[in-house]
């Protein structure tokens, strides 16, 4: 699950409701830098299945398991990306997850930044790249990504559509869940509500071989 929550001073109640309802393995919240320590400490007692981590660039990640912090990447205008290694409860092996938030910079080329994030992600298996790129899915900055990676809202069967901003129109697909080629999206949910201008999204992912073998 990914949601840019727009700089609140608490973890919004809709986040708690979505966690209770859908129980995603991984939750990423962008623009959460104003949430104080006390509010973060109250998260785990309310959701005891999760561990909550604060990342570079004002992002939070909650995991049904554990996460090990990895390399960070400073981007233009306080943008950031960070690599984490996640071990989900009851699952074999680990996953590599890169969490990114690119600052909005109209008319500034994004390819150099998206390429740095792609290099941070590497070419290994079981890798996710999640975040607010402020860059549309069909941008030239994602030309290489579309050749080698799968995309949640754009490729999941029955997807509600890739647009995540602005509120009410959701025409621009600027919030993304990318996955390495060995993974494939099999279901996608999306929702919008005031006062948040970004939509939340929940992507269900499977290994590609499992889906390919199904009738």
Image (cartoon, rainbow, N blue to C red):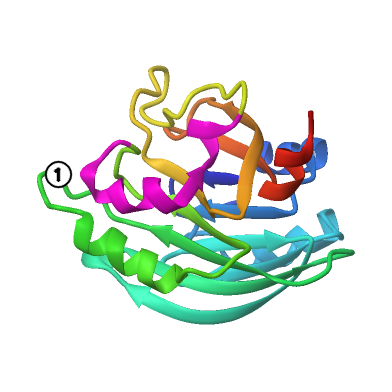
In percent of width and height, residue 53 lies at 63, 70
Residue at position x 46%, y 45% from top? 176
Q: Is residue 12 visible?
A: no
Task: State the residue lying farthest toward the top.
Answer: 168
Which of the 4 quarters of the picture holds residue 16? top right
Q: Which residue range is magenta in the image?
A: 138-156
Total number of numbered labels?
1
Query: Crowdedness of circle 1 by 10 Å Cα count: few (<14), some, many (20+)?
Result: few
Q: Is residue 120 visible?
A: yes
Pick whichever, 100 or 112, lies toward us: 112
Residue at position x 82%, y 55% from top? 47
Which image quarter holds the C terminus? Answer: top right
61 shown above or below 199: below
SS for tag 1?
loop
Pick whichever, 210 or 98, lies toward us: 210
Which image quarter holds the N terminus? Answer: top right
Pick whichever, 41 or 144, lies toward us: 144
Q: In the picture provided, is 30 more to the left or to the right than 45?
A: left
Q: Is residue 1 magenta?
A: no
Q: Which residue is mark 1?
A: 106
Residue at position x 48%, y 30% from top? 195
In percent of width and height, residue 98 lies at 50, 65
């Amino acid at each position: 699950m990914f949601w840019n929550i727009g700089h609140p001073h608490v973890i919004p109640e809709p986040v708690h409701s979505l966690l209770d309802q859908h129980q995603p393995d991984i939750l990423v919240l962008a623009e959460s830098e104003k949430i104080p320590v006390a509010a973060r400490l109250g998260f785990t007692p309310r959701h005891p299945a999760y561990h909550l981590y604060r990342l570079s660039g004002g992002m939070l990640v909650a995991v049904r398991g554990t996460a090990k912090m990895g390399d960070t990447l400073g981007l233009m205008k306080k943008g950031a990306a960070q690599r984490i290694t996640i071990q989900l409860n009851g699952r074999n092996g680990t996953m590599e997850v890169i969490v990114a938030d690119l600052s909005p910079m109209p008319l500034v080329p994004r390819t150099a930044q998206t390429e740095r994030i792609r290099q941070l992600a590497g070419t290994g298996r079981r890798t996710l790249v999640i975040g607010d790129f402020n860059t549309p899915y069909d941008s030239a900055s994602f030309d290489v990504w579309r050749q080698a990676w799968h995309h949640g809202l754009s490729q999941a069967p029955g997807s509600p559509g890739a647009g995540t901003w602005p509120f009410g129109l959701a025409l621009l697909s600027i919030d993304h869940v990318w996955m390495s080629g060995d993974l494939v999206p099999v279901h996608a949910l999306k929702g919008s509500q005031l006062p948040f201008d970004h939509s939340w999204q929940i992507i269900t992912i499977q290994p590609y071989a499992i889906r390919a073998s199904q009738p």
